[in-house]
């Protein structure tokens, strides 16, 4: 009887950890969508600035090269969106046309709120998914694992989840959002003793708590990047408005105007680079080339 109480307590703790983790994942996903929206706004302002500077005649070659870098940064951002939008659309089509694909193929991607999917891929980048988003639909199987955990043999008084002897495994950041939690599935054999079951449940609870902490760090980084992107947008808009009255001939500009324009272009380069920054395995935003797989 005592061991049965221990198992029930461990069961409750595990479910709470899962639910807490799901809530953390929702926060990260919503923040990613917010960041994506902020970046779209910044991109629009950057395009206005680029078009203005591009019209200036006889500008220094260094400045011409710098605004080309700005253009490349924007194009890279657009290319990422285009690539993954095609994959997401294909995934949705497959899930709607394939019989029985609702759980294991496409459900996660197809049911994401608008902006969430793009927010995830632009926040975490390809390096942190490890695979193309079209292959991540299997993470929707986590819903089945959660269903087994919440309404299966455990709550009915048994000791099993979904079969097999593997314990719950943790997926990568995209999988967390698509599946709703970092659970792929697995289970405990029915003939395990309650005490042993409780011990394994408690170990899994601790694993999930560790992932909750990681999600907290991720959310903080995304919030910081949202703030930086909003600041970029505000500063860029003020600077764009201030240079609109400048001569379209660089040689006709005053020394002060040339100095201000040079500073403006430098800020423009920095802001455009922020469009493509992704979270690395230290839960910090870095250039894509510096990122590593955080799964």
Image: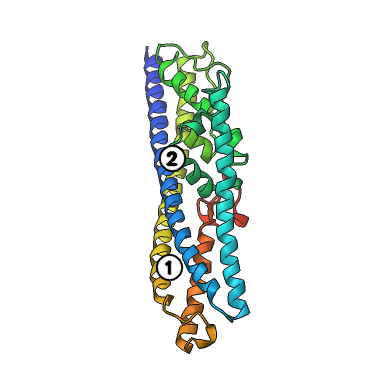
Quadrant assignment for the N terminus: top left
Q: Nearer the viewer, residue 131 or 218?
A: 131
Mark 2 falls on what kind of element? Answer: loop
| Disc 2 crowd, CA 10 A, few/some/many (<14, 14-19, 20+) | few
Q: Nearer the viewer, residue 294 or 241?
A: 241
What label does residue 236 carry, if any?
1
Residue 66 visible, this angle: yes
| First reached walking from the N terminus: tag 1 or tag 2 | 2
| Disc 1 crowd, CA 10 A, few/some/many (<14, 14-19, 20+) | many
User: Residue 120, relative to residue 197: is it above or below?
Assistant: below
Quadrant assignment for the C terminus: top right
What label does residue 114 carry, if any?
2
User: Residue 106, relative to residue 267: is it above or below?
Assistant: above
Q: Nearer the viewer, residue 251 or 234?
A: 251
**Residue 77's spot in the image, x, y percent?**
55, 54
Which residue is found at the position 49% from the left and 15% from the top?
160
Residue 156 occupies quadrant: top left
**Residue 78's spot in the image, x, y percent?**
55, 53
Mark 1 and mark 2: Cα distance apart in space:
27 Å
In-image side of 239 versus 288 (left or right)? left
**Residue 152's spot in the image, x, y percent?**
44, 15
């Amino acid at each position: 009887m005592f061991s049965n109480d221990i198992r029930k307590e461990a069961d409750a703790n595990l479910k709470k950890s899962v639910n807490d983790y799901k809530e953390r994942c929702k926060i990260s996903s919503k923040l990613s969508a917010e960041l994506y929206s902020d970046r779209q706004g910044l991109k629009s302002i950057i395009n206005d600035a680029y078009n203005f500077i591009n019209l200036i005649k006889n500008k220094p070659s260094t400045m011409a090269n710098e605004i080309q870098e700005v253009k490349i940064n924007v194009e890279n951002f657009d290319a990422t969106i285009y690539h993954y939008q095609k994959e997401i659309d294909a995934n949705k089509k497959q899930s709607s046309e394939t019989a029985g694909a609702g759980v294991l193929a496409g459900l996660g991607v197809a049911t994401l709120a608008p902006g969430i999917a793009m927010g995830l891929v632009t926040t975490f980048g390809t390096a942190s998914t490890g695979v193309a988003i079209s292959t991540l639909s299997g993470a929707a199987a986590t819903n089945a694992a959660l269903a087994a955990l919440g309404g299966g043999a455990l709550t009915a008084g048994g000791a099993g989840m979904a079969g097999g002897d593997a314990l719950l495994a943790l997926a990568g950041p995209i999988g967390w959002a698509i599946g709703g939690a970092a659970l792929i599935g697995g289970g405990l054999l029915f003939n395990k003793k309650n005490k042993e079951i409780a011990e394994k449940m408690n170990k899994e609870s601790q694993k999930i708590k560790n992932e909750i902490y990681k999600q907290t760090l991720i959310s903080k980084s995304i919030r910081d990047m949202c703030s930086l992107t909003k600041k970029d947008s505000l500063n860029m808009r003020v600077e764009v408005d201030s240079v609109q009255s400048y001569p379209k001939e660089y040689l006709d500009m005053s020394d002060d105007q040339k100095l201000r324009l040079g500073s403006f272009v430098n800020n423009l380069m920095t802001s455009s680079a922020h469009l493509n920054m992704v979270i690395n395995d230290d839960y910090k935003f870095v250039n894509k080339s510096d990122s590593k797989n955080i799964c």
